[in-house]
Image (spheres, grey):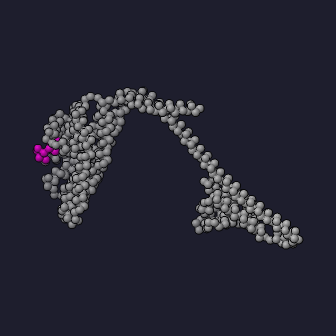
Amino acid sequence: MKTSSTKTVIFILLAGIMLPALIAGGCAKHNSPRRELPEEELSHLDNLMQDSREYDSRRAHRIDSLKMKLDGTPADNLAERYRLSLDIAGRYRSFCSDSSVMFYARAYDIGKELYPGSPLVEIRINLINALAASGIFGPAEKLLESLDSLPLTPGQKLQQASAGRQLYSYMRGYLDEENEFTPMLTHKFVDYDAYLREHLPANDPYRLFLIAEKQVRSGRNKEARNQLDELLKKLKTSDNLYGMVAFQCAQASKNLGDDYNYGRYLTLSAMSDVEGSVKETLALPALAEWLYDKGDVDRAYRYINASLNDATASNSRMRTVAIANFVPIIDNSYRHKISASRDELMIYFLLVAVLLITSGSLLFIFLRNLRRSNRIRRKLQAQTKMQENYIGHFLSLCASYADKLESTRRLVSRKIAAGQSDELLKMMKNSRTSEDQTDDFFKVFDETFLDLYPDFIEKFNGLLRPEEQITYVKGTPLSTELRIYAFVRLGVQESVRIAQILRCSVSTIYTYRNRMRGRAINRDTFETDVAILCRENLP
């Protein structure tokens, strides 16, 4: 039997070691990367992502130094505190949107004190952008609407339009599908977009980007990509606009069916986001989805995890929502990949399931037996201790009575030999001797009972109302009430038997028990509750 169990365990261990390798080998056939990937750009992105912490650290260090400078600026130097708050909020803009909101709000409060009566339009616009990125649309929309009643300069109107375009773009993207709000949001987005294209300077890079983006929406993808390609050559890769332009190039390529350039432009956009420490990115999760479809599972998982980490670190709720939209797509793609090896994987799965069930059953049996053996061991230890206590107290009581009987025998012998039978009879009638013996019995009983149930009195009081609880001084004899219920705990329920042991009348026992039930929290179950007190003290 023992040999058979050993063989079973060895088989389970070997199977557990070998099966994952077999499964991994089988899956590797279906997950090997395909060709037609922009390997040069992807390798560059991998290197940048390895250094992404350094880019983030530089920005965080600069922000921390500005915050320290702000903390050290006197409260009455409003102009410097205003400037520093704006600087910090701007640096947080694409790095941590929640912090950007906080510092723009702080700058707004300082600005109201520094420039009384000023509408502080620029701060309001920046605050709209930060709130929108954080997914706080209600306050952002109210701030945007509040600008309509202010006399804005042409530059401020352009900033308002840019903020409104971004806000309604986010709000449209937040909707899972078309609904009754979509036309209204789209209308406002289009209005702000048209205003920017009409009023921005002709050669402004952002205007050129907007024109090309509209061309993509209109289906003029080839023309749009040509213009966006020219624009990319004029921008630095670390500029936020570079990443936006590259992403639009990717969209145009996708619409044109140019799969290779779709991945290449997504990679360029992701590279720009990493260099600029931009956490509000769609490029990296989209690239992860594309790579997953191409079979490059390692990169796909690495990129999607990096995207989620960036969105979480920056508290960018909008980007978190956008990334979450890719998860089902990746999951569907994964299901499609493994469908070709479904039968093979099913066999592996069944084998693993059987092994897991077997291992679980063996572990359950082992733990159950272990708990049972521990419980038996504790029970035996408790029983041994109880038996020792019982025997010790019993022997002590017997020895005490033996000594008293021997003393009485010698006394009777002396009195009879001396002809003092009358005096002997008088002594025997004296109740003091009987009371002393009863006191000795009660003393032994009290010590034995409290030794077995040291917390009986505490738990007994727990059954009584607070004002009716019994005060007991350690080392003193138990009261009659406590002795009665000590016997109840020991299983002596009949008042007649208790009266015999305590050497009092049955009516006295009834009186004590009725009186004590009246002091209980629950009169109806009081004596039943007493009978099960201190169960944990026994095995």
Residue 463 seen in render: no
Residue 342's x, y, as percent?
41, 28
327 lies above or below 392:
above
86 lies above or below 48:
below
Residue 67's x, y, as percent?
24, 57
| 208 within the magenta span | yes
Q: Residue at x 20, y 55 (%)?
A: 87
Name the residue at the right extreme.
Answer: 419
| 263 within the magenta span | no
Counting the numbered discs, the total is 0
Residue 3's x, y, as percent?
57, 31
Please name whichever residue, 478 or 497, is drawn nearer the observer in this view of the structure.
Answer: 478
401 lies above or below 184:
below
Please name whichever residue, 400 or 381, is drawn nearer the observer in this view of the structure.
Answer: 400
Q: Residue at x 26, y 44 (%)?
A: 52
Quadrant location of the N terminus? top right
Residue 134's x, y, as percent?
28, 50
Q: Which quarter of the picture shows residue 421?
A: bottom right
Q: Residue at x 25, y 61 (%)?
A: 71
Viewed as shown, does residue 133 lie left or right of 433? left
206 lies above or below 356:
below
Q: Residue at x 67, y 54 (%)?
A: 388
Q: Which residue range is magenta in the image?
A: 200-209
Residue 245 seen in render: yes
Viewed as shown, does residue 290 lie left or right of 436? left
